[in-house]
Amino acid sequence: MRKVFLIILLTITIFSCTKELDYELENIKSLVINSVFYPDNNFTFHVSTTASTLEKYDTLKERVQLLLYENDYLIIDTMLGTGTFQTNYKPISNIKYTVKILSNSLQSITASDSIPNSINIDDATLLFPVGVDEMGDEYGEFSVKFTDPANEKNYYELAIYHYINGEKVYYEWYSDYYKVTDPVLINEGLLDYLPTTMFFSDELFDGEIYTLRFKDFANENTSLTSFNSDIYAELRSISKSYYLYRKSYTIHAFNQQTNYEDLHDFLYSGEPQNMYTNVNNGFGIFVGYNKTSKEFIYTK
């Protein structure tokens, strides 16, 4: 009888704990909105909720109201559910945009950002060869020159791309074939985290004409110079929120790549990184950027 009583007591305790955990997880759920916007592209929003450990999906259980403001003037008012919502409205530079998501069951969220002015690329050059490495192989150098506006804080992102069958394909910066020695990029302190693009502030060159450089170690199969297509530089003027998000995401993505079945990876994995968000009372991002492109001029 005593054993039966003990089993019943344990069962009641387990189910009681489970019920309490469900309640707490449900209460800490928050709305999530993600939107990266730039001129000539319609506003697009993805709305969901944070997922608990007891649920497989982070879908909304209700329809929510989305409000979009342009300089505090309401331009979009619509109801939507989980998923991607594309508007027919294109954002404009130097305008403050604010998005609000109103919910009957979850705390409402809001976020604001704007698109900076575009910064033209003055010159984009590929020199090859410019030197020989320790193995006796020749290497080239890419340079991108632009003029930074003075007396204001500016943030940038640089991407390199070419076209394959008419489709734009971006290069990945963390390849061993590309070496970054530029002091501005080194100053960001993120090269060890294998960023997919290079993002940086004008902390070291405010108001100056700056030339960003990186080396391309030539190989007929791997060098950027080996592709039979034109190569382009894309310079993005990004908001501060965009910049902070990209930095936090790069560290987060790097720390998540380890294989925890390996004890060494487990012991030496990176510290957990909190993802940056500019969403009040929720999660996600609402950030803007501008961009210009220029084809690299190849010079021997």
Image: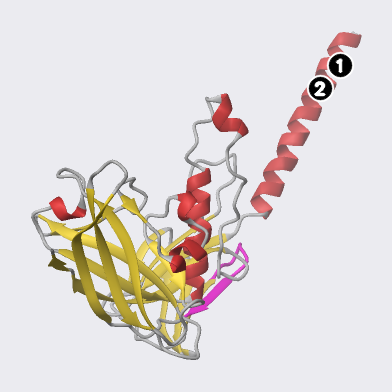
Answer whether labels 2 and 1 touch (C-beta < 8 Å): yes
Q: Residue at x 59, y 31 (%)?
A: 266
Q: Residue at x 20, y 65 (%)?
A: 126
Q: Quadrant of residue 39?
A: bottom left
Q: Residue at x 86, y 9 (%)?
A: 3
The boundaries of the magenta stretch are 102-113
Q: Which residue is mark 2?
A: 10
Q: Amino acid at mark 2?
A: Leu
> For this view, does 104 lie left or right of residue 218?
right
Q: Quadrant of residue 219?
A: top left
User: Quick one: SS at disc 2?
Assistant: helix
Residue 198 seen anywhere in this rendered image of the structure: yes
Residue 129: assigned label:
none
Residue 6: assigned label:
1
Residue 201, relative to residue 141: is it above or below? below
User: Quick one: SS at disc 1?
Assistant: helix
> For this view, does 172 lie left or right of residue 79?
left
| Rendered location of residue 147, percent (x, y) | 35, 84
| Rendered location of residue 124, percent (x, y) | 22, 72
Residue 139, relative to residue 182: is it above or below? above
Alpha-carbon neighbours of circle 2 within 10 Å: few (<14), some, or many (≥20)? few
Q: Quadrant of residue 119?
A: bottom left
Q: Is residue 112 magenta?
A: yes
In the foreground, 156 or 112: 156
